Image: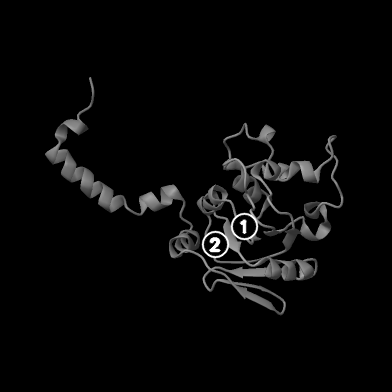
Amino acid sequence: MDKFTTLTAPAAPLMMENVDTDLIIPKQFLKTIKRTGLGKNLFNDLRYTQDGQEIGNFVLNKPAYRKAGILLAGQNFGCGSSREHAPWSLLDFGIRCVIAPSFADIFYGNCFKNGILPLTLPMAAIEQLAAVADTTPVTVDLKNQTVKAGNLSFTFDIEPFRKTVLLEGLDDIGQTLQKTKAIDGFEAKQSTTQPWLYQEGK
């Protein structure tokens, strides 16, 4: 998983409340178990007509936001089903940070497991960022816990463990591998006290 330290990127304003995971990535695109290839269908029902043509006034289809790395959103972002494809599709599009007043719990946790920073700011702050988003990139500094755009500057809170996970680029497997020495020591000891657990079956 890529580390998240400082990100400067266009911030696309999707100022909608209760954006659920089916809107983020509709159910017909959940057949894959790969984390790549989903970006083209991110917000599919908002981005395209039924015959596959782009909807020009949708934010991610506008020239200023086609390479957005940050998404500005409303309350309760990521609600609905717990599909991990939702953060996969955001990441595959290129979005590494979602800024919203609040998030659904499971989506929030899934973001950290996939290298996305979901950070919370008051709606008033997000509206100020959205107001300058078409001309001013946003910088998110995880180490110093700041969000800046032009003359705007905000601070955000984050749990220390989740902050470390992103700064060091550790997914669940990476966190486990950090304990390799302790795991090897435990298995070495257990193999002498309970050797039958390590005997190959016939």
* Left/right of residue 159 with respect to residue 118 in the rendered view: left
* Left/right of residue 169 with respect to residue 99 in the rendered view: left
In the drawing, what numbered circle is on residue 4?
Answer: 2
The residue most toward the left is 193
Quarter occupied by residue 147: bottom right
* Left/right of residue 145 with respect to residue 189 in the rendered view: right
Estimate the x, y position of residue 51 in percent, counting from the top left. 85, 34
User: What is the secondary structure assignment of the residue under circle 1?
Assistant: loop
Q: Residue shown at 52%/60% (left/top)?
A: 3
Looking at this view, is 162 or 182 the one in front? 162
When the figure is inspected, residue 32 is found, relative to residue 169, above or below; the finding is above
Estimate the x, y position of residue 92 in percent, counting from the top left. 64, 48
Looking at this view, is 63 or 103 the one in front? 103
Q: Residue shown at 17%/39% (left/top)?
A: 191
User: What is the secondary structure assignment of the residue under circle 2?
Assistant: loop
Name the amino acid type tagged 1: Arg
* Left/right of residue 146 with respect to residue 125 in the rendered view: left
In the drawing, what numbered circle is on residue 96?
Answer: 1
Estimate the x, y position of residue 34 in percent, counting from the top left. 58, 38
The residue most toward the bottom is 151
**Neighbourhood count class around disc 2 (C-alpha, 10 Å): few under 14, some 14–19, many 20 upward:** many
Q: Can residue 170 be seen by looking at this rendering?
A: yes
Q: Residue shown at 69%/49% (left/top)?
A: 19
Quarter occupied by residue 75: bottom right
Name the amino acid type tagged 2: Phe
When the figure is inspected, residue 69 is found, relative to residue 153, above or below; the finding is above
Residues tagged 2 and 1 counted as in contact (Cβ below 8 A):
yes
The residues bearing labels 2 and 1 have C-alpha atoms spaced at a distance of 8 Å
Which of disc 1 and disc 2 is earlier in sequence?
2
The residue most toward the top is 202
Q: Residue shown at 54%/66% (left/top)?
A: 5
Q: Can residue 137 be seen by looking at this rendering?
A: no
